[in-house]
């Protein structure tokens, strides 16, 4: 293997050192349709099936496993707070064309508990065991309604014209915030040491859907005016972002109150390190800089990077370096090595721009993340074979082979 700048040759981790992180996002649901030699391979409603998924994920070199806890507002474990697994009429898990998927997929009936089981196995294997919690309650407003959401239409979001979005609630309501914190308590109970909230998976939500009474009344009280009809108004976006920041602040406080050192990661897509207010604020409705400044997040995860197809790796290197400067320590930074290419920016787009194979691109991106001073990489998402066999081999060798990548702790 070629030498890397700053690489440490070690037999084990020394005091004050931490492994270069490979955070694999895992949606067990997406393994349900995976076939090996023509046969369905993963029974995702069993402990054995979960272990098969984990084994596949670990082939990428993953050392932080971020297990998806829900689909929209449908919990994928035995939830007290949003338990509808015994209430079939409220179970809306369907594909967009309304076909049932693999039966009812009653994750809440799974024994052992899906999340607690996999987090426990991770800890036994000296891996970080965490949760990937999307910042969405409906998957593009059409399905995955939760029982609590359907029972509380008074908290649904609304657009400027007053039209509600069925099943999507606003964190501006104290009742909604408390509901989400009770869900968070359930994740803490299951032993997680990392919580990753992914604002890219917002279900299509934006400040355009926050014309709800508490937000509108606070705007009137502060400005003496009616809210702008244009939801892209920068002042309106900043106003709405305050409620989302308050949600993350409350999450941080709840994690700290657990008495355990639980890390909070927040994922943002195409953050602009040069602009005071960057365009993605219009989609995710939160100011990532504020989260970093206040120390709310331990780690900022760049879901999608900004780069130029005419000079792909040079521009990626510049972007990663700029993000490292924009995210001062002690906040940690993870850079993307995406197998997904939804909305561009993943390895398929790099392949189109460079003609390189997936494993060659993955190696280059890992090197760039290391050289810029990032604390690790994030993998969106580790489904069956979307990181191809040769890619998994190369990644694991780079990160966990004879020359392990290790960062000095700040």
Image (cartoon, grey):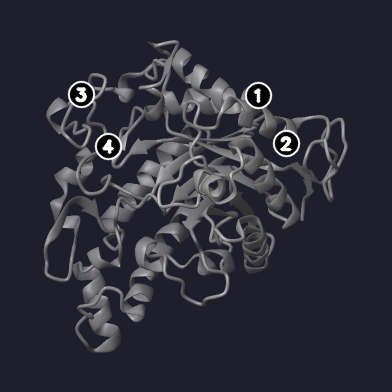
Q: Which residue is mark 1?
A: 125
Label 4, label 3: how far apart the Cα atoms are: 11 Å
Q: Earlier in the sequence, mark 2 or mark 4?
A: 4
Residue in the foreground of this view, choosing between 390 and 261:
390
Q: Earlier in the sequence, mark 1 or mark 4?
A: 4
Q: Residues within 10 Å of mark 1 (few under 14, many from 20)?
A: few
- For discs 1 and 4, the disc positioned in front in the rendered view: 1
Residue in the foreground of this view, choosing between 296 and 100:
100
Label 2, label 4: how far apart the Cα atoms are: 39 Å
Tell me if residue 253 can be seen: no
Label 1, label 3: how far apart the Cα atoms are: 34 Å
Q: Which mark is residue 399?
A: 2
Question: For this view, does 391 lie left or right of residue 190?
Answer: right
Q: Secondary structure at mark 3?
A: loop
Label 1, label 2: how far apart the Cα atoms are: 17 Å
Q: Are marks 2 and 4 in contact (CB under 8 Å)?
A: no
Task: Give the image location of residue 96, x and y in percent.
Answer: 20, 37
Task: Give the image location of residue 349, x and y in percent.
Answer: 50, 48
> Where does the N terminus fall, quadrant-wise?
top right
Q: Which residue is mark 4?
A: 82
Q: Which mark is residue 86?
A: 3
Q: Secondary structure at mark 1?
A: loop
Q: Secondary structure at mark 2?
A: helix
Q: Which mark is residue 373?
A: none
Q: Earlier in the sequence, mark 3 or mark 2?
A: 3
> Where does the C terminus fall, quadrant-wise?
bottom right
């Amino acid at each position: 293997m070629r030498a890397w700048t700053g690489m440490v040759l070690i037999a084990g981790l020394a005091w004050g050192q931490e492994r270069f992180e490979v955070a694999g996002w895992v949606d067990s649901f997406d393994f349900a349709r995976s076939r090996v030699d023509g046969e369905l391979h993963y029974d995702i409603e069993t402990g054995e099936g979960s272990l098969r998924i984990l084994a596949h994920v670990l082939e990428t070199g993953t050392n932080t496993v971020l297990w998806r806890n829900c689909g929209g507002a449908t919990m994928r474990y035995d939830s007290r707070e949003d338990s509808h697994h015994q209430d079939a009429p409220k179970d809306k898990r369907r594909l967009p064309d309304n076909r049932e998927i693999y039966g009812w997929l009653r994750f809440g009936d799974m024994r052992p508990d899906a999340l607690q089981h996999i987090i426990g196995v991770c800890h036994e294997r000296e891996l970080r065991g965490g949760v990937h919690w999307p910042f969405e309650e409906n998957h593009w407003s059409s399905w995955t309604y939760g029982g609590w959401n359907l029972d509380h239409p008074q908290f649904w979001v609304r657009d400027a014209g007053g039209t509600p979005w069925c099943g999507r609630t606003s964190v501006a309501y104290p009742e909604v915030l408390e509901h989400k914190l009770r869900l968070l308590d359930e994740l803490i109970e299951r032993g997680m040491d990392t919580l990753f909230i992914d604002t890219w998976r917002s279900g299509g939500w934006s400040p355009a859907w926050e014309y709800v009474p508490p937000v509108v009344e606070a705007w009137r009280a502060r400005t003496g005016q009616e809210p702008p009809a244009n939801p892209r108004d920068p002042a309106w976006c900043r106003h709405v972002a305050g409620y989302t920041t308050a949600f993350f602040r409350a999450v941080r406080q709840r994690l700290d109150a657990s008495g355990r050192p639980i890390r909070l990661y927040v994922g943002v897509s195409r953050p602009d390190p040069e602009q005071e207010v960057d365009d993605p604020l219009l989609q995710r409705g939160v100011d990532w800089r504020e989260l970093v400044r206040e120390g709310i997040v331990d780690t900022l995860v760049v879901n999608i990077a900004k780069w130029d197809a005419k000079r792909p790796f040079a521009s990626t290197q510049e972007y990663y370096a700029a993000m490292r400067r924009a995210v001062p320590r002690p906040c940690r930074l993870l850079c993307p090595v995406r197998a997904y290419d939804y909305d561009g920016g993943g390895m398929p787009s790099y392949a189109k721009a460079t003609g390189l194979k997936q494993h060659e691109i993955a190696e280059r991106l890992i090197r760039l993340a290391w050289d810029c001073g990032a604390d690790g990489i994030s993998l969106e998402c580790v489904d069956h074979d979307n990181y191809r066999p040769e890619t998994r081999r190369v990644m694991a060798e780079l990160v966990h082979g004879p020359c392990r990548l290790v960062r000095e702790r700040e």
